Amino acid sequence: MSKPKREYTTEFKQKAVELSYARGNAAEVCRELGLNPSVLGRWRREAKKYGENSFPGKGNPKLTDEQREIAELKKKLRDVEIERDILKKAIDPSQACPSLKKVCNTFS
């Protein structure tokens, strides 16, 4: 039977990564903390790639600043498109711009 999956806190992961760089010996840190070397290696790669955004916890995607900005801009664009569509529907097309014939009939 397999072992239950261990979950580590964000702080633990960050400290383990910092410790492995400070000592320069990841294998020693793994032995001390009871970690599989591949786990610490993955944490180190994630920390290098995402920096402060590493290990966000459950349900929080790891996004770079650019990716986060793109997601925010896409959301704003969707909101503006919805607002535009609502305003389009609110304006009666026949009243929006009177035809030349209607204007001429008014003055006749």
Image: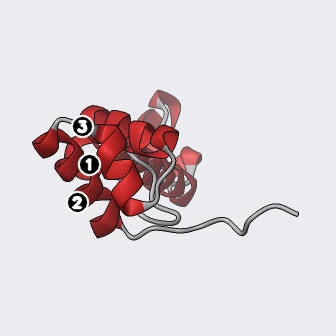
Residue at 56 percent across and 45 percent down: it is 93
Which circle, 3 or 1, is nearer the viewer? 3
Question: Which residue is depicted at the point 45% across and 67% down?
Answer: 8
The picture places residue 65, in percent across and down from the top left corner, at 23, 40
Q: Nearer the viewer, residue 8 or 60?
A: 8
Which quadrant holds the C terminus?
top left
Q: Which residue is mark 3?
A: 25
* Amino acid type for the residue under numbered disc 2: Lys
Q: Within the image, what quadrant is residue 24 found in? A: top left
Q: Are marks 3 and 2 in contact (CB under 8 Å)?
A: no
Residue 70 seen in the figure = no
Residue located 28% across and 55% down the image: 16
Residue at the farthest right position: 1
Residue wearing tag 1: 17
Badge 2 local density, few (<14 within 10 Å), some, or many (20+)? few
Instruction: Assign a secondary structure to mark 3.
Output: loop
Q: Is residue 92 above or below residue 12?
A: above
Labels 3 and 2: the sequence-earlier one: 2
Residue drawn where x is 40% and y is 44% of the image: 40
Graded by Cα atoms within 10 Å as few (under 14), some (14 to 19) or many (20 or more), the crowding at tag 3 reads few
Q: Quadrant of residue 43?
A: top left
Up the image or down, 12 lies above or below 17; here it is below
Q: Say how the picture is coloured.
A: secondary structure
Q: Which kind of residue does numbered mark 3 sit on?
A: Asn
Q: Is residue 23 left or right of residue 76?
A: left
User: 68 and 87: which one is in front?
Assistant: 68
Q: Position of residue 86 (x, y in %)?
A: 52, 57
Instruction: Report the side of 41 relative to 2 (left or right).
Output: left
Are the residues tagged 1 and 2 within 8 Å (C-beta)?
A: yes
What kind of element bears circle 1? helix
